[in-house]
Amino acid sequence: MSSDYVYHSDFWLEEPEEANPFAAKACYCHGYDVYGQIIEKASWFEYLLLMFKGDRPQPRETVFLEKIALVLANLGPKEASIRAAMNGGVAGTNHSSALMAALAVGSGQYGGSQELEICMRLWRECGQDLERWKARLQAPEQDERVDIWPAMEHPPGFDPNGDLIPTTVLQALEFLVKFAPDDGALSWLKKHRCDLEEFFSCPISITAITAAAFVDLGLDQDQGSMLYLILRLPGAAVHALEQRKMGWKKFPFYSPAIELEDDPGPVQKKGVEDQS
C-alpha cells in the first residue's frame, strides 16, 4: 500500500487481516493487546486513562476517575448542556442532534469545556499560590482569537449567579478530595475555597472542582476538555430521551421573556373584516 494512504498514530497499532487489509486482525493500544488483554482484564476507566495518558494507571487513579465520572454523569436539567439536549429531545429531533446540541452548549465559557480548559491552564500558571490565583482569575484571557471566544464575564471556575456553594457541589468536593493526593490541586482548592469565594463574592462551581481533579490525575488541559465533554453526555442523553417521550406540552416555554420588536398585530383572514 502506498505510504500516501497510511494513517499515523503514536498510541494505536493495527495488524491487518491477510485476506482484507482494511480489517484488523489485532489492535494494540500503547502496546497492550486490546482484544487479547485489555477487554478481558481492564475496566472501562483503566482503558480510558491508558488511551489518554499512555501508561497503565494506578488503581487509585482508576477509582478517582470513576468517581469523577459519577459526579459528572448527570448534572441535572439546570445545567446548560443538558437543557440543550432536552430542547432537542422535546422537538423530536434525531438522537445525534440532541447530543450535538449538548456538546455545542457544553463547550463554552459558562460551565463548559472552554472554561474548564482555562482553569486547568491557570493551575499550570498559578500552582498553589493563592495571591496569584486572585490576580489571574480577574484577567484570565490569553486567547486573542476574539471571533471565537469573547472575553470572560466571570472568574473561571465560579458561579456568577450564586451566593453560596450548592450543597451538591460541596458534597462533590468533599467526596472527591478523599481520592485525591493530600498535597494536590483538589486538596488545595478545598482548603482555600472560602478565601476565594469571599474574594470574588461568588461560589466555586463544579467546573473548578473537575479542573483540579483532572490536574491531580496528570491530564493536560486538552485531555481534560475532551473528557469533560464526554463524561457529561450520559445525563444529556437520558434527559433528551425522557423529554422526547413526555412531549412539548409538559415542557416549559418561556413566552413572557419573548418580545417582538416588529409585532404585525392580529392576523386577519383574507376578505374578512375585523369586527372588533
Image (cartoon, grey):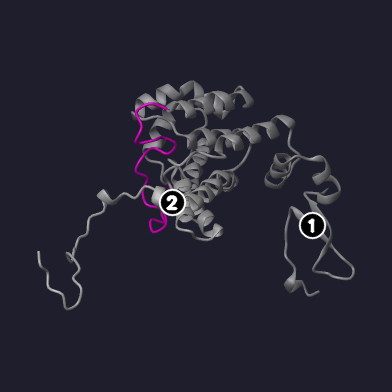
In the rendering, which numbered label is found on residue 13? 1
Q: Is residue 107 visible?
A: no
Front-most of residues 178 and 121: 178
Helix, strand or loop at disc 2?
Answer: loop
Quadrant in the rendering for residue 161: top left
Image quadrant containing the C terminus? bottom left
Magenta-tinted stretch: 142-165
Q: Is residue 5 above or below residue 180?
A: below
Callout in the foreground (2, 1): 1
How many labels sit on residues? 2
Q: Position of residue 210 (x, y in %)?
A: 54, 36
Query: Relative to residue 80, is residue 209 drawn left or right?
Result: right
Query: Relative to residue 147, is residue 8 drawn left or right?
Result: right
Q: Main secondary structure of the magenta part?
A: loop
Quadrant in the rendering for residue 135: top left
Image quadrant containing the N terminus? bottom right
Q: CA distance from mark 2 to mark 1?
A: 35 Å
User: Within 10 Å of the Cα at label 2, are there few (<14), some (14-19), or many (20+) other Cα atoms?
Assistant: few
Q: Residue at x 50, y 23 (%)?
A: 190
| Amino acid on which disc 1 is placed | Leu
Q: Position of residue 81 (x, y in %)?
A: 47, 47
| Amino acid on which disc 2 is placed | Asp
Q: Is residue 250 visible?
A: yes
Query: Relative to residue 113, is residue 63 drawn left or right?
Result: right
Does the magenta-highlighted stretch encompass residue 56? no
Q: Position of residue 256 (x, y in %)?
A: 25, 49
Sequence order check, earlier mark of 2 and 1: 1
Q: Residue at x 63, y 37 (%)?
A: 218
In the rendering, which numbered label is found on residue 143? 2
Front-most of residues 43 and 263: 263
Q: Is residue 4 above or below residue 242?
A: below
